[in-house]
């Protein structure tokens, strides 16, 4: 059975469909003006002016606009009627400077209190006192909104410096190469009454995935997961970086980071609930495949590597057993990011 589009072999079908789509998108006022112009062409200028109450000048302007656009009805849509020249507020600069001074002296002082404090000052300077709403608009027109963060004081009344730790972020739009960026996820599975923690490493730039089954989240087991990754020991100037896929379940990676603060670095994700969609099903597939491989209970970490179907680069022998799969195009393991240098 052949399945064809509704307009198959119908001459001019798509052209008429495009015209109909354009007509549906035309504003209603433009359609009404087009009907008036068509009435003018059929019954004459005087009849059109009497029937619709439109002047001759307006009718000729509509016809000229329609002709200039090649008969497109959208040319008759009403334009913006906003004035080209608007009134600009003429506020005394001295008043703006005094408002800024008061909001600096009393951080983020409201417009109602400013109105009370400005009354004697305006009488002294001979400036008309604005209303409360006008003071609010003057503050809103300022680029910085005249906001000032109050200084935090210690027990002795001294200003404490603001200390903000800058969290490392992966630059937006950076194209990573193979073995340069790591995505880590931890999945808990219970089989035959035994709980296993499956730690998956996925490299978005290559076709390699690594999964490690841990009996527990102890340090000796999490270190074994890191040891299964090629060249797991980083240096202080070139630390290993991982991208957590599930912020609520990344205890092994956090444990490794606490024991190796100089060679392992975490790039947190914001917002916390964001996870890259393409990596989710692949992570689950790696976990399911490893669960099939782990048929006998064991207290040792079990590791399974999934290699690309056709790879030319030599892959280090870092696992106990590995198998080449042709039906999966999975991605994933380690990164040494060049942007952290």
Image (cartoon, grey):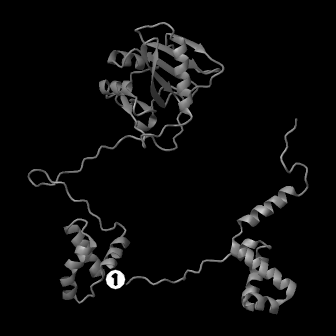
Between residue 19 and residue 195, name the one nearer to us: 195
- The number of callouts visible is 1
Label 1: element kind: loop
Residue shown at the point (30%, 82%) measured from the top left: 131
Q: Quadrant of residue 167?
A: top left
Vertical relation: 289 (above or below) 54: above
Residue 214 on image: x %, y %:
41, 16
Decide: is 1 above or below 313.
Answer: below
The answer to whether residue 305 is above or below residue 27 is above
In the picture as drawn, the residue positioned furthest to the left comes out as 156
Location of residue 12 in the rendering, given as x and y in whole percent from the top left corner: 88, 58
* Nearest to the observer: residue 57 or residue 88: 57
Image side of residue 311 versus residue 268, left or right: right
Q: Quadrant of the C terminus?
A: top left
Q: Which residue is mark 1?
A: 91
Q: Nearer the viewer, residue 159 or 33?
A: 33
Residue at 56% in and 23% down = 285
Task: Please identify the quadrant where the N terminus is shown.
Answer: top right
**Is residue 312 found left or right of 111 in the rendered image?**
right
Q: Quadrant of residue 289?
A: top right
Taking the spot 47% from the left edge, 30% from the top edge, the residue there is 183
Give the crowd class for mark 1: few <14, some 14-19, many >=20 residues within 10 Å.
few
Left or right of 219: which side holds 321?
A: right
Res. 2 in view: yes
User: Residue 62 location, x and y as percent?
Assistant: 74, 82
Q: Is residue 228 visible?
A: no
Above or below: residue 167 compared with residue 300: below
């Amino acid at each position: 059975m052949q399945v064809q589009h509704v307009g198959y072999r119908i001459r001019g079908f798509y052209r008429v469909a495009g015209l109909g789509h354009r007509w549906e998108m035309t504003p209603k006022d433009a359609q009404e003006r087009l009907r008036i112009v068509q009435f003018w062409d059929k019954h004459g200028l005087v009849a059109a002016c009497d029937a619709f109450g439109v002047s001759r000048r307006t009718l000729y302007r509509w016809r000229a606009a329609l002709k200039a656009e090649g008969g497109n009805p959208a040319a008759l849509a009403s334009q913006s009627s906003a004035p080209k020249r608007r009134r600009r507020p003429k506020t005394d600069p001295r008043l703006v400077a005094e408002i800024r001074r008061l909001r600096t002296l009393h951080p983020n002082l409201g417009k109602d209190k400013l109105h009370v404090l400005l009354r004697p000052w305006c009488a002294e300077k001979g400036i008309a006192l604005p209303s409360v709403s006008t003071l609010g608009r003057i503050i809103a027109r300022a680029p910085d909104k005249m906001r000032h963060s109050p200084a935090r004081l210690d027990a002795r009344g001294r200003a404490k410096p603001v200390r903000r730790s800058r969290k490392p972020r992966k630059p937006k739009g950076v194209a990573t190469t193979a073995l340069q960026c790591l995505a880590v996820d931890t999945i808990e599975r219970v089989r035959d009454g035994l709980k296993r923690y499956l730690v998956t490493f996925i490299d978005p730039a290559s076709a390699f995935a690594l999964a490690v089954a841990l009996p527990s989240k102890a340090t000796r087991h999490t270190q074994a997961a890191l040891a299964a990754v090629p060249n797991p020991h980083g240096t202080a100037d070139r630390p290993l970086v991982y991208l957590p896929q599930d912020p609520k379940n990344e205890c092994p990676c956090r444990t490794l980071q606490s024991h190796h603060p100089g060679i392992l670095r975490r790039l947190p994700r914001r917002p916390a609930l964001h996870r890259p969609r393409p990596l989710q099903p692949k992570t689950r597939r790696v976990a399911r495949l490893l669960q099939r491989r782990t048929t006998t209970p064991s207290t040792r970490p079990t590791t399974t590597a999934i290699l690309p179907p056709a790879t030319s680069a030599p892959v280090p022998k870092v696992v106990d057993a590995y198998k080449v799969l042709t039906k999966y195009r999975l991605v994933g393991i380690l990164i040494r990011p060049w942007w952290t240098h």
